């Protein structure tokens, strides 16, 4: 049974920082990309925040470029999202996702990030 466990969400002030972690456990072979999505609430679609390949290639949403940094520890099947210079509009539930070669995608249950102005 594959599980993704997110942690690190919480409350921050605008301009502050938070670091999210996503640990994948279970029988997992060949994790390709790891990434983060967020859902800002009713009326919004879940949107891509950032992804990272096994080789370290990254993709970021324009709204977070220069403020967020995604990284991963392949030995621990863990991804991180360092969020700096947070804005109130970053308030959302953040979901971890992994893409597995020749297998299904997996999602975490989400962690709430709230940024106060």
Image (cartoon, rainbow, N blue to C red):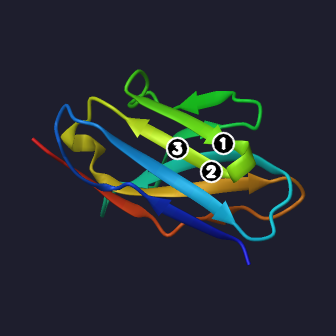
Q: Where is residue 27 in the image (x, y as percent from the top left)?
A: 81, 69
Please say if the residues under marks 3 and 2 sit with CB atoms less than 8 Å apart.
Answer: yes
The crowding category of the residue bearing disc 3, from other C-alpha atoms within 10 Å (few below 14, some 14 to 19, many at least 20), is many
**Residue 40 visible somewhere in the drawing:** no
Residue 23 occupies quadrant = bottom right
Left or right: 65 with respect to 36?
Answer: left
Vertical position of residue 56 compared to residue 37: above or below: above
In which quadrant will I find the N terminus? Answer: bottom right
Q: Position of residue 117 (x, y in %)?
A: 9, 41
Task: Please report the residue visible at 43 percent of the width from the left and 25 percent of the height from the top.
Answer: 65
The residue at 37%/26% (across/down) is 67
Does residue 57 lie above or below 25 as drawn? above
**Between disc 3 and disc 1, whose residue precedes?**
1
Of pointers 1 and 2, the one earlier in the residue sequence: 1
Question: In this orientation, which residue lies closer to the viewer: 28 or 88?
Answer: 28
Q: What element carries label 1?
A: strand
Q: Where is residue 8 in the image (x, y as percent from the top left)?
A: 38, 54
Could you tell me if the residues under marks 1 and 2 are in contact, i.e. CB atoms within 8 Å?
yes
Q: Please name the residue shown 80% across and 63% down the image.
A: 28
Q: Which residue lies under the disc numbered 3?
A: 80
Residue with the mark numbered 2: 78
Location of residue 56 (image quadrant): top right
Q: Which mark is residue 89?
A: none
Badge number at residue 73: 1
For numbered disc 2, what is the local secondary structure? strand
Are dots 3 and 1 in contact, CB under 8 Å?
Answer: yes
Residues packed near mark 2 inside 10 Å, few (<14), some (14 to 19) or many (20 plus): some
- SS at mark 3? strand
């Amino acid at each position: 049974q594959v599980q993704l466990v997110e942690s690190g969400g919480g409350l921050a002030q605008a301009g502050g920082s938070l670091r999210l972690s996503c640990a994948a456990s279970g029988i997992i072979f060949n994790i390709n990309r790891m990434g983060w999505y967020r859902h800002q609430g009713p009326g919004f679609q879940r949107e891509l925040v950032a992804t990272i390949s096994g080789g370290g290639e990254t993709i970021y949403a324009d709204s977070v470029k220069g403020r967020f940094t995604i990284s991963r520890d392949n030995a621990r099947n863990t991804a991180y999202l360092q969020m700096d210079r947070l804005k109130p509009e970053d308030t959302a539930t953040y979901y971890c996702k992994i893409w597995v070669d020749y297998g299904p995608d997996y999602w975490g249950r989400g962690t709430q990030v709230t940024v106060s102005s």
